[in-house]
Amino acid sequence: MSQHPDARPALSVHLLRDLQDAIGEATSALAHRLRMSATDAAALEHVALADQPLGPGELGARLAVTRSSATEVVDRLARAGHVERVRDETDRRRYRLEPTAAARSRVRAELDPLRRSLDSAADGFSPAQQQVIAAYLRAVTSAYRSYAAAPDDVSESPRAAR
């Protein structure tokens, strides 16, 4: 028996697109709740939740903005009292971005309900199922990162192709 042509596999690119849209909506909601632009909220989220302190260049790469745009974002966040520039102890030419205690607390407080919901979503799966889901998500993450890291083969501009 053949499958209906409109039927999609259970793990489809459409579900991933829907997840990306939901993440975007959550990011917009966070920005609204923090009363700042989406870019500033995303930057603050990256700085507040990073495993390692970020520099302005690393933040710009995560936000996919130019170095000068990243500097403008950092300037706004610093003026508002959300981040501080701290000299790196190992490389005095470099600055680390540190969230203020109040900013870290506020971001975590806003995201904790989401984190709890995500954790409870996993509760409906057995440990073995959770391992399979985690493996799938790691593979998807790897695919996205590989795509992002691939050389930019722009031999012809979109306008020239017309």
Image (cartoon, rainbow, N blue to C red):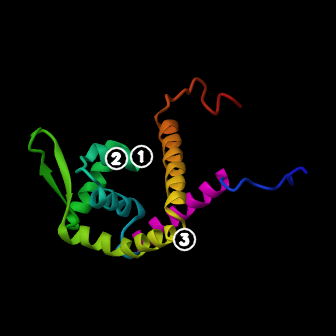
- State which region is magenta: 12-32
Amino acid type at circle 1 is Ala
Tell me if I can see residue 95 in this picture: yes
Residue 124 tag number: 3
Neighbour tally class for label 1: few under 14, some 14-19, many 20 plus, Cα within 10 Å: few
Residue 124 is drawn in which quadrant?
bottom right
In the rendered view, tell whether residue 75 sits above or below residue 114.
Answer: above
Circle 3 or circle 1, nearest the eye:
3
**Looking at the rendering, in which quadrant would you find the C terminus?**
top right
Mark 2 highlights which residue? 60
Residue 49 tag number: none
Amino acid type at circle 2 is Gly
Marks 2 and 1 close (CB-CB < 8 Å):
yes
Point 33% across, 56% down: residue = 46
| Residue 43 position in % (x across, y down) | 34, 57
Neighbour tally class for label 2: few under 14, some 14-19, many 20 plus, Cα within 10 Å: many
- Please, what is the dominant secondary structure of the magenta stretch? helix
Cα distance, mark 2 to mark 3? 37 Å
Point 85% across, 52% down: residue = 3
